[in-house]
Image (cartoon, grey):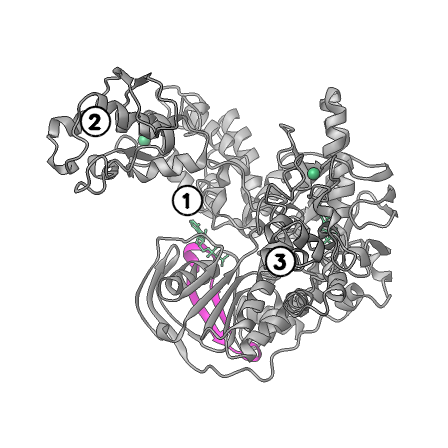
Amino acid sequence: MIRVRDAHLHNLRNVDVDLPRGQLVAVTGVSGSGKSSLAFGTIHGEGQRRYFESVAPFARRLISSAVDPQVGGIEGLPPTVALQQSTSGGGARSTVGTVSAMSNTIRLLYSRVGDNPEGLYSDSFSPNTPEGMCPDCQGTGIQHVPTEESMVPDPTLSINEGAIKAWPQAWAGKNFHDILEELGYDLDSPWQDLSQKDRDWILFTEERPVVTVHPHRGADQIQRNYEGTWRSVASYLTKTFRETQSDTLRDRTLRFMESHTCPTCGGRRLNPKALKVTYAGLRIDELGALPLADVLTLLQAQPRDNTAAELLLKQVIPALESAVELGLGHLSLDRPSATLSPGELQRLRLAAQLRSGLFGVAYVLDEPSAGLHPEERTAVMDICRRFLAAGNSVLLVEHDMDLVAQADWLVDVGPLAGEAGGEILYSGPIDAYAAETPTSRALHSRQLQLNAAPRDAHGELSLHGVNCRSIKELDVDFGLGQFTAVAGVSGSGKSTLISTVLAGLLRSTATAVSDNEEETGWSVRAHEGLDQVSRVVQITQKPIGRTPRSTLATYTGLFDAVRKLFAATPAAKEKKWTVSRFSYNVKQGQCPTCGGAGQIEVELAFLPGSYSTCPDCHGARYNPETLEITWNGYTIADVLALTVDDAAAVFAEEPPIARALATLQSVGLGYLRLGQGAPELSGGEAQRIKLATELQRSRNSRRGHTVYILDEPTTGLHPADIALLNAELHKLADAGQTVLVVEHNLSVIASADRVLEMGPGAGADGGRIIADATPAELARRDTPTGRALASRA
Ligand code: ADP
Ligand code: ADP
Ligand code: ZN
Ligand code: ZN
């Protein structure tokens, strides 16, 4: 048994709980009840604390301030390995191959077993090592070249009018300008009238003359001469691009260079020698571009006629097999991990774990079913069983009751969220759970309600000749005013069709509210009905910010109204303090130690992004003078500490604030504190905050017909929360708006007016519409989603 005593992290109420080792333990509860706080924060947190102390005992004090699992003690805790859903997939160069650790083995295959006349080592097959990268593009496959057109986009301007857009801002740019002036160049004629020789020198010379600059400044400034060093614009750009650590500066620099495929490697990122080596008839970049399912078939057919081949294939084939089983067969090794969904990324890490051969550890998994079609979810159970068979324990934070039902042991956290949660409602064998709770209700009544009265469409949006990734020449239409679920096995093209193509198209013709990056690489030959849509709202699970400065209160805009109340108090008026004084992002009001964040980032190389509470304001974010002002007895910091539910009572007489709070409650977020910072919010919470903000906006004004686009909005939500969210989405359709959700959740699919199912398979085998039906009709069809609906209806 793993015996947890007095766990009190976040909302956990001094919890004692015993979990069996060597069994499959499911941790359930409504969102915000404390599941993650128990499984990840407490159990894995304690595991990590012990691990860090063993590797870096000298850093004990720093570690305990950053990783504090706030638990009395845990007996019988094995080492823990956590696989958490995260949207960040490592560095910019991280790929499916590197995340799964398969790339290493593949490179060894090329160097040891491949047809390798040069005798290259495995490092030479990686575009990420100095030995392996193409020397002319640093392994990026793209060359960035400054040209006259890219550096001086408007040649009718003179230098004094800002012709050289590529020059840096502030001092450095002025320095270059002043040097040219000292050198006697013509700064007032249009750029195009300068001689080619002068233009080439300014833009491209490698010379770096040192010039005495006599700067002219305003009369009140000191004018001091200095020695300035010249750099041509091109040399400045390439040097900056090569050396800067700042993404912003890098992006700015890129704007003034032309980018094209590297001619040396043809975009393959590798050095020419490595590109000559083949294995299984393919170059390593060709193998890297194949879907994993094909790589598996190919490698299975390779001879194992020497020790190296035998050994390496024995390593990589099981990892490929589990990746394919986990619904990842459509990915390729070279796919950048930044383009994967959080669920895909976690399953990839899971597949990689299977080959690590660890035993005696406790795996802590975060909803590994996310992103999988119900028919594909059995693979998750198989993998958990394999971990157990190898002598490990598995703790599964999971919402899919079909999976939970297969666990050995259940820990249910609740009863509600936040302060109304944090208790263990049940810990015991799964079959014996009979109490009246949301989880046991969901476990025991898994029958679906198929929508019996689907709404009719009041218009149509038709796309013809859609092309993007695996979608080829697809014709599809969507009903306006309907709630449409887009279903299908993973990799079948749902997100591509909805989040990339349709959202992209609507963004180009209607007002858009979206935090998704604009994607390219799609085309639509013809379309009808787009003129009926005036807005598109795309809501993702991306965080609402990266630092504790973005909070629920600021994001929803309700904090502006709260600050007005404080500025209107007699005490504030007397001091002539305005609304800005009550913003923690403004100097006058904020705590100087933490700059208004309430927390201070702890710099630990092995734990980036850790925060600890500010020692001066203790999380209040404000300086003491600001906190002297109260409104109805509350300081502004007290307000930020309120939960949405409590605030609803406090601000009941303030209509704009009360309305915003009511909307948050309607999507099940009453338990969040107003000042809860972005790093403390889950993806599902962030998404519901965005949805609530949007509902609030659309209620406030009439903005014409809106299309709402959501991609797997139920990820991370308990069945009880899903019901709430789904009801809100249906209200939008009731009001005549169009709702499109990419979903695997059967209760959401069953509630839709219309289901578009994509398939039949993944990747190149997908990209088509295999069913377009009401849920009741679909349940009678022999498709993956039809079968799943039928089995539960
Ligand atoms: P669940 O996993 O069940 O959704 P969590 O364990 O994430 O719930 O959250 C339980 C409670 O703790 C919630 O009220 C949540 O807002 C709060 N919480 C979560 N993370 C943090 C954090 N880093 N700091 C403070 N409170 C947090
Ligand atoms: P689904 O949403 O049904 O899981 P996707 O639309 O994500 O399917 O994927 C459809 C196909 O497009 C798959 O072969 C997938 O690997 C590929 N794909 C998806 N996103 C990207 C991307 N950003 N870059 C390259 N290929 C992608
Ligand atoms: Zn190259
Ligand atoms: Zn502070």
Ligand 3 under 8 Å from disc 2 Cβ: no
Q: Which mark is residue 191?
A: none
Mark 3 belongs to which amino acid? Thr
Work out how far the residue at label 3 is from the one at label 2, CA to CA, in angstroms. 55 Å
Q: Quadrant of the N terminus?
A: top right
Quarter assignment of residue 214:
top left
Characterize the local packing of mark 1: few (<14), some (14-19) or many (20 or more) Cα atoms within 10 angstroms: some
Tag 2–tag 1 contact (CB < 8 Å):
no
Tag 3–tag 1 contact (CB < 8 Å):
no
Quarter assignment of residue 77:
top right
Q: Does any portion of residue 220 appear in the rendered image?
A: yes
User: Please, is residue 287 above or below residue 451 in the view?
Assistant: above
Mark 3: secondary structure: loop
User: Please, is residue 415 above or below residue 577 in the view?
Assistant: below
Q: Which residue is mark 3?
A: 715
Q: Which residue is mark 2?
A: 202
Query: Where's residue 739, x and y in %?
Result: 51, 71
Which region of the structure is painted magenta? Answer: 755-777
Q: Which mark is residue 290?
A: 1
Q: Between 577 and 547, which is closer to the camera in this rendering?
A: 577
Q: Is residue 593 left or right of residue 119?
A: right
Q: Between 304 and 698, which is closer to the camera in this rendering?
A: 698
Work out how far the residue at label 2 is from the one at label 1, CA to CA, in angstroms. 46 Å
Mark 1: secondary structure: loop
Which quadrant does ligand 4 occupy? Answer: top right
Query: Where's residue 574, x and y in %?
Result: 68, 52
